[in-house]
Image: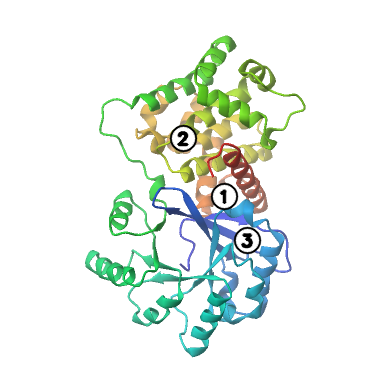
Amino acid sequence: MHALDKVEYVEAAPVAQRAWLARQPILDRHGATYAYELLFRSGPTNRAIFSDGSQAAAQTIMTAFAEMDLGEVVGRGKAFFNVTREVLLSPAIEALPKHRVVLEVLETVHIDDALIARMKELRDGGFHLAIDDFGLRDELWALVDLADVVKVDLLPLDDAQLEETTRRLKSTGVKLLAEKVETREQHERVRELGYDYFQGYFFQVPEMLSAQKLPQARLETMQLMAKVQREDTPLSELERLISADAALSYRLLRLLASAAYARAHKVDSVHRAIVMLGRQKLSQWVTLLALAGLDDQPPALLATAMLRARMCELLGEQIGRHDPATFYSAGLFSLLDVMMGRPMKELLASMPISRELEAALLKRKGTVGATLRAVADYEQGEWRSIDLVRLPPEDFADAYFAAVRWSAQVMGELGLI
Protein backbone atom coordinates (compact mmCIF):
# COMPACT_ATOMS: atom_id res chain seq x y z
CA MET A 1 0.00 0.00 0.00
CA HIS A 2 1.35 3.43 -0.96
CA ALA A 3 -0.70 6.04 0.82
CA LEU A 4 -1.32 6.24 4.51
CA ASP A 5 -4.44 4.18 4.90
CA LYS A 6 -5.71 4.33 8.46
CA VAL A 7 -2.44 3.81 10.22
CA GLU A 8 -0.79 4.81 13.48
CA TYR A 9 2.34 6.96 13.83
CA VAL A 10 5.45 6.36 15.87
CA GLU A 11 8.42 8.72 15.90
CA ALA A 12 11.74 6.92 15.69
CA ALA A 13 14.90 8.19 17.36
CA PRO A 14 16.55 11.23 15.74
CA VAL A 15 18.61 10.38 12.67
CA ALA A 16 20.28 12.40 9.93
CA GLN A 17 16.98 12.45 8.06
CA ARG A 18 14.35 12.02 10.79
CA ALA A 19 12.25 8.94 10.13
CA TRP A 20 8.69 8.67 11.37
CA LEU A 21 6.88 5.37 11.33
CA ALA A 22 3.29 4.51 10.65
CA ARG A 23 1.91 1.19 11.81
CA GLN A 24 -1.20 -0.82 11.09
CA PRO A 25 -2.04 -4.12 12.80
CA ILE A 26 -2.29 -7.38 10.86
CA LEU A 27 -4.55 -9.93 12.54
CA ASP A 28 -4.62 -13.70 12.16
CA ARG A 29 -7.68 -15.94 11.85
CA HIS A 30 -8.09 -16.01 15.63
CA GLY A 31 -8.07 -12.21 15.97
CA ALA A 32 -4.58 -12.09 17.48
CA THR A 33 -2.09 -9.49 16.26
CA TYR A 34 0.28 -11.37 13.95
CA ALA A 35 2.34 -8.39 12.81
CA TYR A 36 2.29 -4.67 12.05
CA GLU A 37 2.90 -3.00 8.73
CA LEU A 38 5.34 -0.13 9.13
CA LEU A 39 5.32 2.81 6.73
CA PHE A 40 8.24 5.19 6.90
CA ARG A 41 7.70 8.92 6.53
CA SER A 42 9.98 11.93 6.70
CA GLY A 43 7.65 13.81 9.07
CA PRO A 44 4.06 14.88 9.63
CA THR A 45 3.75 15.88 5.96
CA ASN A 46 3.19 12.17 5.20
CA ARG A 47 5.85 12.20 2.46
CA ALA A 48 7.29 8.73 1.97
CA ILE A 49 11.02 8.51 2.60
CA PHE A 50 11.28 6.02 -0.24
CA SER A 51 9.75 8.43 -2.72
CA ASP A 52 13.07 9.18 -4.40
CA GLY A 53 14.35 5.60 -4.28
CA SER A 54 17.79 6.83 -3.29
CA GLN A 55 20.51 5.07 -1.37
CA ALA A 56 20.29 7.85 1.23
CA ALA A 57 16.65 6.97 1.81
CA ALA A 58 17.52 3.32 2.28
CA GLN A 59 20.21 4.25 4.79
CA THR A 60 17.72 6.37 6.73
CA ILE A 61 15.52 3.32 7.19
CA MET A 62 18.43 1.18 8.25
CA THR A 63 19.43 3.80 10.82
CA ALA A 64 15.85 4.04 12.10
CA PHE A 65 15.75 0.29 12.65
CA ALA A 66 19.06 0.46 14.48
CA GLU A 67 17.92 3.31 16.74
CA MET A 68 14.46 2.13 17.71
CA ASP A 69 13.45 -0.84 19.83
CA LEU A 70 11.51 -2.89 17.30
CA GLY A 71 9.96 -4.95 20.07
CA GLU A 72 8.28 -1.84 21.49
CA VAL A 73 6.68 -1.09 18.13
CA VAL A 74 5.59 -4.55 16.97
CA GLY A 75 5.77 -6.64 20.13
CA ARG A 76 6.53 -10.27 19.44
CA GLY A 77 5.25 -10.10 15.89
CA LYS A 78 6.93 -9.28 12.63
CA ALA A 79 7.35 -5.91 10.96
CA PHE A 80 6.09 -5.70 7.38
CA PHE A 81 7.29 -2.72 5.36
CA ASN A 82 7.36 -1.59 1.74
CA VAL A 83 10.53 -1.77 -0.33
CA THR A 84 11.10 -0.27 -3.75
CA ARG A 85 13.24 -1.92 -6.38
CA GLU A 86 16.15 0.38 -5.47
CA VAL A 87 15.96 -0.45 -1.78
CA LEU A 88 15.54 -4.17 -2.46
CA LEU A 89 18.71 -4.17 -4.57
CA SER A 90 20.64 -2.16 -1.97
CA PRO A 91 23.20 -4.08 0.14
CA ALA A 92 22.08 -1.98 3.15
CA ILE A 93 18.88 -3.99 3.47
CA GLU A 94 20.86 -7.05 4.53
CA ALA A 95 21.59 -5.32 7.86
CA LEU A 96 17.93 -5.68 8.91
CA PRO A 97 16.95 -8.30 11.52
CA LYS A 98 15.78 -10.91 9.02
CA HIS A 99 13.83 -12.93 11.61
CA ARG A 100 11.71 -9.88 12.54
CA VAL A 101 10.92 -8.25 9.19
CA VAL A 102 8.91 -9.07 6.07
CA LEU A 103 9.96 -7.17 2.96
CA GLU A 104 6.93 -6.06 0.92
CA VAL A 105 7.72 -5.80 -2.79
CA LEU A 106 5.59 -3.01 -4.21
CA GLU A 107 3.10 -3.94 -6.91
CA THR A 108 4.54 -1.25 -9.19
CA VAL A 109 8.02 -2.78 -9.17
CA HIS A 110 9.80 -3.27 -12.49
CA ILE A 111 10.21 -7.03 -12.86
CA ASP A 112 13.27 -8.39 -14.59
CA ASP A 113 15.94 -11.06 -14.13
CA ALA A 114 17.93 -8.86 -11.73
CA LEU A 115 14.96 -8.39 -9.41
CA ILE A 116 14.04 -12.07 -9.44
CA ALA A 117 17.64 -13.06 -8.72
CA ARG A 118 17.80 -10.61 -5.82
CA MET A 119 14.54 -11.90 -4.33
CA LYS A 120 15.87 -15.46 -4.53
CA GLU A 121 19.10 -14.35 -2.86
CA LEU A 122 17.26 -12.65 0.01
CA ARG A 123 14.88 -15.57 0.47
CA ASP A 124 17.74 -18.07 0.53
CA GLY A 125 19.47 -15.81 3.04
CA GLY A 126 16.56 -16.15 5.47
CA PHE A 127 14.45 -13.07 4.68
CA HIS A 128 10.68 -13.31 4.37
CA LEU A 129 9.11 -11.68 1.33
CA ALA A 130 5.61 -10.45 0.57
CA ILE A 131 4.00 -9.07 -2.57
CA ASP A 132 2.05 -5.90 -1.84
CA ASP A 133 -1.31 -4.87 -3.32
CA PHE A 134 -1.72 -7.98 -5.43
CA GLY A 135 -4.62 -7.40 -7.77
CA LEU A 136 -5.11 -7.33 -11.51
CA ARG A 137 -1.51 -6.94 -12.68
CA ASP A 138 -0.65 -10.26 -14.36
CA GLU A 139 3.11 -9.65 -14.26
CA LEU A 140 3.14 -10.14 -10.48
CA TRP A 141 2.41 -13.85 -10.88
CA ALA A 142 6.09 -14.29 -11.79
CA LEU A 143 6.98 -13.39 -8.18
CA VAL A 144 4.45 -15.54 -6.32
CA ASP A 145 6.74 -18.57 -5.98
CA LEU A 146 9.35 -16.35 -4.29
CA ALA A 147 6.95 -14.93 -1.69
CA ASP A 148 5.94 -16.18 1.74
CA VAL A 149 2.87 -13.92 1.81
CA VAL A 150 0.75 -12.33 -0.90
CA LYS A 151 -1.29 -9.29 0.11
CA VAL A 152 -4.52 -9.08 -1.87
CA ASP A 153 -6.01 -5.60 -2.18
CA LEU A 154 -9.80 -5.92 -1.92
CA LEU A 155 -10.63 -2.52 -3.42
CA PRO A 156 -10.05 -3.17 -7.17
CA LEU A 157 -11.57 -6.69 -7.18
CA ASP A 158 -15.21 -7.57 -7.59
CA ASP A 159 -16.43 -10.77 -5.95
CA ALA A 160 -15.83 -12.98 -9.01
CA GLN A 161 -12.31 -11.61 -9.47
CA LEU A 162 -11.59 -12.07 -5.77
CA GLU A 163 -12.71 -15.71 -5.88
CA GLU A 164 -10.64 -16.48 -8.97
CA THR A 165 -7.53 -14.69 -7.69
CA THR A 166 -7.85 -16.45 -4.35
CA ARG A 167 -8.32 -19.86 -5.96
CA ARG A 168 -5.19 -19.47 -8.11
CA LEU A 169 -3.09 -18.17 -5.23
CA LYS A 170 -4.18 -20.91 -2.82
CA SER A 171 -3.06 -23.53 -5.32
CA THR A 172 0.52 -22.26 -4.92
CA GLY A 173 0.58 -22.78 -1.16
CA VAL A 174 1.46 -19.15 -0.39
CA LYS A 175 -0.02 -17.47 2.71
CA LEU A 176 -2.80 -15.01 1.88
CA LEU A 177 -3.30 -11.61 3.51
CA ALA A 178 -6.38 -9.54 2.73
CA GLU A 179 -5.77 -5.80 3.01
CA LYS A 180 -8.10 -2.82 3.18
CA VAL A 181 -10.60 -4.93 5.10
CA GLU A 182 -12.82 -2.19 6.48
CA THR A 183 -16.08 -3.95 7.39
CA ARG A 184 -16.97 -7.06 9.33
CA GLU A 185 -18.78 -8.36 6.25
CA GLN A 186 -15.58 -8.11 4.22
CA HIS A 187 -13.70 -9.87 7.00
CA GLU A 188 -16.18 -12.73 7.12
CA ARG A 189 -16.08 -13.06 3.33
CA VAL A 190 -12.30 -13.35 3.00
CA ARG A 191 -12.15 -15.56 6.08
CA GLU A 192 -14.58 -17.95 4.38
CA LEU A 193 -12.31 -17.91 1.33
CA GLY A 194 -9.46 -19.18 3.50
CA TYR A 195 -7.31 -16.11 4.03
CA ASP A 196 -4.67 -16.39 6.74
CA TYR A 197 -4.22 -12.73 7.73
CA PHE A 198 -6.29 -9.56 7.68
CA GLN A 199 -5.31 -5.89 7.56
CA GLY A 200 -7.73 -3.01 8.01
CA TYR A 201 -9.89 -1.48 10.72
CA PHE A 202 -12.86 -3.84 10.50
CA PHE A 203 -12.32 -4.76 14.17
CA GLN A 204 -13.10 -1.18 15.23
CA VAL A 205 -16.52 -1.17 13.56
CA PRO A 206 -19.38 -1.56 16.08
CA GLU A 207 -21.48 -4.70 15.65
CA MET A 208 -24.77 -4.19 17.46
CA LEU A 209 -26.09 -7.24 19.32
CA SER A 210 -29.59 -8.35 18.36
CA ALA A 211 -30.57 -9.36 21.89
CA GLN A 212 -32.59 -6.90 23.96
CA LYS A 213 -30.24 -7.21 26.93
CA LEU A 214 -26.49 -7.30 27.25
CA PRO A 215 -25.02 -10.77 27.81
CA GLN A 216 -24.47 -11.39 31.51
CA ALA A 217 -20.67 -11.05 31.37
CA ARG A 218 -20.86 -7.69 29.64
CA LEU A 219 -23.66 -6.51 31.91
CA GLU A 220 -21.56 -7.33 34.97
CA THR A 221 -18.60 -5.49 33.44
CA MET A 222 -20.72 -2.39 32.87
CA GLN A 223 -22.10 -2.55 36.42
CA LEU A 224 -18.61 -2.84 37.88
CA MET A 225 -17.33 0.09 35.82
CA ALA A 226 -20.30 2.18 36.91
CA LYS A 227 -19.54 1.40 40.55
CA VAL A 228 -15.87 2.34 40.35
CA GLN A 229 -16.71 5.53 38.46
CA ARG A 230 -19.03 6.74 41.23
CA GLU A 231 -17.20 8.89 43.77
CA ASP A 232 -19.75 8.06 46.47
CA THR A 233 -19.21 4.30 46.32
CA PRO A 234 -17.67 3.31 49.67
CA LEU A 235 -14.17 1.88 49.43
CA SER A 236 -15.33 -1.10 51.45
CA GLU A 237 -17.89 -1.91 48.74
CA LEU A 238 -15.25 -1.55 46.02
CA GLU A 239 -13.04 -3.95 47.93
CA ARG A 240 -15.91 -6.44 48.15
CA LEU A 241 -16.76 -6.17 44.45
CA ILE A 242 -13.17 -6.56 43.32
CA SER A 243 -12.44 -9.40 45.72
CA ALA A 244 -15.53 -11.26 44.53
CA ASP A 245 -14.06 -11.45 41.01
CA ALA A 246 -11.10 -13.82 41.28
CA ALA A 247 -9.79 -13.10 37.78
CA LEU A 248 -10.00 -9.34 38.27
CA SER A 249 -8.30 -9.50 41.68
CA TYR A 250 -5.51 -11.66 40.29
CA ARG A 251 -4.88 -9.34 37.36
CA LEU A 252 -4.89 -6.25 39.57
CA LEU A 253 -2.37 -7.69 42.03
CA ARG A 254 -0.26 -9.12 39.21
CA LEU A 255 -0.15 -5.75 37.49
CA LEU A 256 0.78 -3.88 40.65
CA ALA A 257 3.62 -6.33 41.27
CA SER A 258 4.99 -5.86 37.73
CA ALA A 259 7.55 -3.50 36.29
CA ALA A 260 4.69 -1.54 34.72
CA TYR A 261 3.74 -0.33 38.20
CA ALA A 262 6.86 -0.88 40.27
CA ARG A 263 6.48 -0.25 44.00
CA ALA A 264 8.88 -0.57 46.90
CA HIS A 265 6.34 -2.42 49.05
CA LYS A 266 4.65 -5.68 48.14
CA VAL A 267 0.94 -5.45 47.33
CA ASP A 268 -0.58 -8.78 48.34
CA SER A 269 -4.24 -7.94 48.92
CA VAL A 270 -7.06 -5.98 47.33
CA HIS A 271 -7.32 -3.85 50.48
CA ARG A 272 -3.66 -2.85 50.24
CA ALA A 273 -4.07 -2.13 46.51
CA ILE A 274 -6.94 0.27 47.26
CA VAL A 275 -4.98 2.04 49.99
CA MET A 276 -1.92 2.37 47.77
CA LEU A 277 -3.67 3.49 44.59
CA GLY A 278 -6.36 5.81 45.87
CA ARG A 279 -9.80 6.12 44.32
CA GLN A 280 -8.85 7.76 41.00
CA LYS A 281 -6.05 5.38 40.00
CA LEU A 282 -8.06 2.42 41.28
CA SER A 283 -10.92 3.43 39.01
CA GLN A 284 -8.59 3.68 36.01
CA TRP A 285 -6.95 0.30 36.55
CA VAL A 286 -10.10 -1.62 37.48
CA THR A 287 -11.94 -0.23 34.45
CA LEU A 288 -9.08 -1.24 32.17
CA LEU A 289 -8.86 -4.71 33.72
CA ALA A 290 -12.62 -5.20 33.50
CA LEU A 291 -12.50 -4.47 29.76
CA ALA A 292 -9.51 -6.79 29.44
CA GLY A 293 -11.72 -9.54 30.81
CA LEU A 294 -13.98 -9.43 27.73
CA ASP A 295 -12.36 -12.41 26.03
CA ASP A 296 -14.57 -12.33 22.93
CA GLN A 297 -12.78 -9.28 21.50
CA PRO A 298 -9.49 -9.21 19.56
CA PRO A 299 -6.58 -8.02 21.70
CA ALA A 300 -5.90 -5.33 19.09
CA LEU A 301 -9.14 -3.61 20.12
CA LEU A 302 -8.15 -3.34 23.78
CA ALA A 303 -4.62 -2.35 22.75
CA THR A 304 -6.05 0.51 20.69
CA ALA A 305 -8.28 1.69 23.55
CA MET A 306 -5.35 1.55 25.98
CA LEU A 307 -3.09 3.42 23.60
CA ARG A 308 -5.72 6.13 23.14
CA ALA A 309 -6.24 6.35 26.90
CA ARG A 310 -2.57 6.86 27.68
CA MET A 311 -1.97 9.23 24.78
CA CYS A 312 -5.01 11.36 25.69
CA GLU A 313 -3.82 11.44 29.31
CA LEU A 314 -0.32 12.57 28.34
CA LEU A 315 -1.68 15.26 26.02
CA GLY A 316 -4.04 16.43 28.76
CA GLU A 317 -0.98 16.91 30.98
CA GLN A 318 0.78 18.82 28.19
CA ILE A 319 -2.22 21.10 27.77
CA GLY A 320 -1.99 21.87 31.48
CA ARG A 321 -5.33 20.45 32.56
CA HIS A 322 -5.71 19.48 36.20
CA ASP A 323 -7.78 16.38 35.34
CA PRO A 324 -5.78 14.19 32.94
CA ALA A 325 -7.81 11.22 34.27
CA THR A 326 -10.79 12.55 32.30
CA PHE A 327 -8.69 12.47 29.15
CA TYR A 328 -7.61 8.91 30.00
CA SER A 329 -11.24 7.82 30.39
CA ALA A 330 -12.16 9.40 27.07
CA GLY A 331 -9.55 7.32 25.28
CA LEU A 332 -10.35 4.11 27.12
CA PHE A 333 -14.12 4.42 26.58
CA SER A 334 -13.83 5.57 22.95
CA LEU A 335 -14.35 2.00 21.68
CA LEU A 336 -16.85 0.94 24.35
CA ASP A 337 -19.67 0.61 21.81
CA VAL A 338 -17.53 -1.81 19.79
CA MET A 339 -16.64 -3.86 22.85
CA MET A 340 -20.19 -4.04 24.18
CA GLY A 341 -22.19 -4.19 20.97
CA ARG A 342 -24.45 -1.36 22.07
CA PRO A 343 -24.81 2.31 21.02
CA MET A 344 -22.48 4.62 22.93
CA LYS A 345 -25.32 6.84 24.14
CA GLU A 346 -27.14 3.86 25.70
CA LEU A 347 -23.99 2.68 27.48
CA LEU A 348 -23.10 6.10 28.87
CA ALA A 349 -26.60 6.55 30.25
CA SER A 350 -25.83 3.84 32.82
CA MET A 351 -22.52 5.36 33.91
CA PRO A 352 -22.01 8.32 36.28
CA ILE A 353 -19.66 10.32 34.09
CA SER A 354 -19.27 14.08 33.76
CA ARG A 355 -21.03 16.07 31.05
CA GLU A 356 -17.63 16.99 29.63
CA LEU A 357 -16.67 13.35 29.20
CA GLU A 358 -20.07 12.50 27.75
CA ALA A 359 -19.78 15.33 25.21
CA ALA A 360 -16.28 14.16 24.30
CA LEU A 361 -17.41 10.58 23.67
CA LEU A 362 -20.67 11.33 21.87
CA LYS A 363 -19.83 14.48 19.93
CA ARG A 364 -16.05 14.98 20.26
CA LYS A 365 -16.86 18.36 21.84
CA GLY A 366 -14.79 20.43 24.26
CA THR A 367 -11.09 20.22 25.01
CA VAL A 368 -11.31 16.54 25.92
CA GLY A 369 -13.32 15.79 22.80
CA ALA A 370 -10.92 17.67 20.55
CA THR A 371 -8.01 15.76 22.06
CA LEU A 372 -9.76 12.43 21.55
CA ARG A 373 -10.56 13.33 17.95
CA ALA A 374 -6.95 14.31 17.31
CA VAL A 375 -5.65 11.09 18.86
CA ALA A 376 -8.07 8.90 16.87
CA ASP A 377 -7.22 10.76 13.66
CA TYR A 378 -3.51 10.59 14.43
CA GLU A 379 -3.56 6.79 14.66
CA GLN A 380 -5.24 6.69 11.23
CA GLY A 381 -2.76 9.05 9.56
CA GLU A 382 -5.10 12.06 9.51
CA TRP A 383 -3.41 15.25 10.72
CA ARG A 384 -6.07 17.92 10.17
CA SER A 385 -7.56 17.80 13.67
CA ILE A 386 -4.21 18.05 15.48
CA ASP A 387 -4.40 21.82 15.20
CA LEU A 388 -7.53 21.75 17.37
CA VAL A 389 -5.41 20.87 20.40
CA ARG A 390 -2.80 23.56 19.77
CA LEU A 391 0.23 21.49 20.64
CA PRO A 392 3.33 21.00 18.47
CA PRO A 393 3.24 17.84 16.30
CA GLU A 394 6.34 16.70 18.18
CA ASP A 395 4.28 16.51 21.39
CA PHE A 396 1.86 14.17 19.65
CA ALA A 397 4.69 12.00 18.38
CA ASP A 398 6.28 11.81 21.83
CA ALA A 399 2.95 11.03 23.50
CA TYR A 400 2.14 8.39 20.91
CA PHE A 401 5.44 6.58 21.22
CA ALA A 402 5.18 6.69 25.03
CA ALA A 403 1.65 5.29 24.79
CA VAL A 404 2.83 2.50 22.48
CA ARG A 405 5.46 1.49 25.02
CA TRP A 406 3.06 1.70 27.96
CA SER A 407 0.24 -0.26 26.34
CA ALA A 408 2.63 -2.95 25.10
CA GLN A 409 4.12 -3.32 28.59
CA VAL A 410 0.74 -3.56 30.30
CA MET A 411 -0.65 -5.96 27.68
CA GLY A 412 2.43 -8.10 28.18
CA GLU A 413 2.07 -8.10 31.95
CA LEU A 414 -1.56 -9.16 31.58
CA GLY A 415 -0.57 -12.00 29.26
CA LEU A 416 -2.59 -10.57 26.37
CA ILE A 417 0.26 -10.48 23.84
Amino acid type of the residue that numbered disc 1 sits on in the rendered structure: Ile
From this viewpoint, which residue is outermost toward the right?
A: 264
For residue 361, which numbered disc appears in the image? 2
Q: Which mark is residue 321?
A: none
| Residue hosting label 1 | 386
Image position of 308 with respect to 46: above or below: above
Task: State which tag comes first along the sequence, 2 or 1.
Answer: 2
Q: Residue at x 68, y 23 (%)?
A: 267
Would residue 272 be found to the left or right of residue 165 on screen? Answer: right
Q: Marks 3 and 2: CB-CB under 8 Å? A: no
Q: Residue 22 or 360: which is nearer the viewer?
A: 22
Quarter-of-image position of residue 204: top left
Q: Position of residue 189 (x, y in %)?
A: 28, 55
Picture coordinates of residue 385, whole percent (x, y) = 53, 49
Name the spot of residue 210 as percent of width and height, x first.
Answer: 25, 33
Residue type, mark 3 in image: Trp
Image mark for residue 20: 3
